[in-house]
Amino acid sequence: MNSPEPRHAKGSLLMQTQAPGSPAGSAAREAALFQLADAARILGLDDGMHAVLASPRRSLTVSVPLLRDDGTVEVFKGYRVQHNLARGPAKGGLRFHPETDVDEVTALAMWMTWKCAVVNIPFGGAKGGVTLDPNRLSAREVERVTRRYTSEILPLIGPERDIAAPDVGTDNGTMAWIMDTYSVNAGYSVPGVVTGKPLTLGGSAGRAGATARGVVIAALAALRDAGRSPEECTAAVQGFGKVGGLAAQYLSDAGIRVVAVSDAIGACHHDSGLDIAALRRDLAAEAITVAEFEGGQPITHDELLTLDVDILVPAALSGVFDESNADRVKASLIVEGANGPTTPAADQIFADRGVVAVPDILANAGGVIVSYLEWVQNLQAFSWSEEEVHLRLRNLMDIAYSEVASISRERGITLRQAAHVLGVGRVATAARLRGMYP
Ligand code: GLU
């Protein structure tokens, strides 16, 4: 297993750029800055370049007033952060979640910058968020919030400026409303302002399952590196949403025994493997939660994370692995479907224990890869078949995985450090070539 670089103190830059916010948000931002500082040290970046890369290029906070169905008015906070544009237009999802804040969105925007660079697609990184619980609102209310948020961030977005996509709490319907709001204001249809749209509005074949497909491509590549075959491996998947549900399905299609999965409410387990297709069918057909699935026994979230499995796929929110549970994780391979699931403290514990983590900015890049393919198709008013999209996705994921794995081997650093060395290094090179204006 790769041994990590020695522990090092958090730099003063980290302290200076810390902004007050929710504990989860500031922990995510702290983690992103810690990972950048680590990569800057390994790459030998000068302090000026490090400072540029640590600072978001633009950050817009907006108030989003909503006329509720009952006639009352509620005001939500929204954000769009463009972290870095050195390699191309800003790209990144939009999150609706009650705990999101500007710190979390800033961290997620920074991770998008490195993610796009790791898989070598010509985008900078961005993220958006609105602090709200979409489950508490009616569908019409969510639509009104989406449209008002879009109109508040209009000056920042556009197919050459900043392209949104689904993230936690948003989906292809949300993207349709953003595309419509932008297009009505422009006076003509602009499909390229968002990706992850419905197919009929210019969405790409293969986008819905792209993140999950990429997660499984990364998992299989890591198994190959470890000399293990899928058929001899078991997996647990934390989160059964857009990423986790399909990741469980594709893992099982690849011959891996998926023995446990969870959603926000609970988890279920079956030693000889869950029938994921049946579970997905039951969830779609009935109002049940994962823990109520008849084909498994309910277990707790903590039990799922510490199950004796080979592969663990976190596919929900950030900060899942920390110093309270990292030493109890029994899986030897973690493949990060979520953004930021592993805190730096947990990362150090994993590295010390020889647990391999395929980092978020590589493992879950399948989504933004197919977003890139969707954007290219939109700009050309052209569409590729699902097979062509799958092929291009696989190709870009395989190249990125093998580049990261060879940096990890050559430098004796973890896959997360190697992915950051690749991504941060590419962005720093682009920034250096462009030079400083004025
Ligand atoms: N929200 C996804 C991510 O975190 C997709 C972003 C995109 O397609 O722009 O990678």
Image (spheres, rainbow, N blue to C red):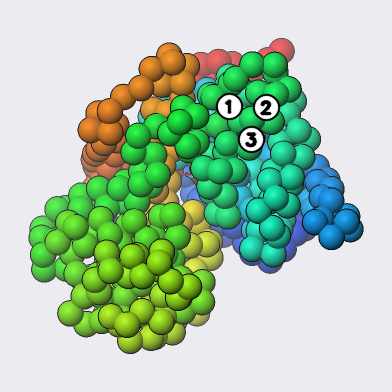
Q: Secondary structure at mark 3?
A: helix
Q: Is residue 314 visible?
A: no
Q: Is residue 292 visible?
A: yes
Residue 120: image location, x then y, percent: 38, 29
Label 3 amino acid?
Ile
Tell us which disc is closer to us: 3 or 1: 3
Q: CA distance from mark 2 to mark 3?
A: 6 Å
Tell us which disc is closer to us: 2 or 1: 2
Q: Secondary structure at mark 2?
A: helix
Quadrant of the drawing holding the C terminus: top right
Quadrant of the drawing holding the N terminus: bottom left
Residue at 41% in and 64% down: 284
User: Circles 3 and 1: CB distance less than 8 Å?
Assistant: yes
User: Circles 2 and 3: CB distance less than 8 Å?
Assistant: yes
Q: Is residue 137 above or below residue 425?
A: below
Q: CA distance from mark 2 to mark 1?
A: 8 Å
Q: Nearer the viewer, residue 1 or 163?
A: 163
Label 2 amino acid?
Tyr
Q: Which residue is mark 3?
A: 178
Q: Which residue is mark 1?
A: 193
Q: Residues within 10 Å of mark 1 (few under 14, many from 20)?
A: many
Residue 324: image location, x then y, percent: 50, 79
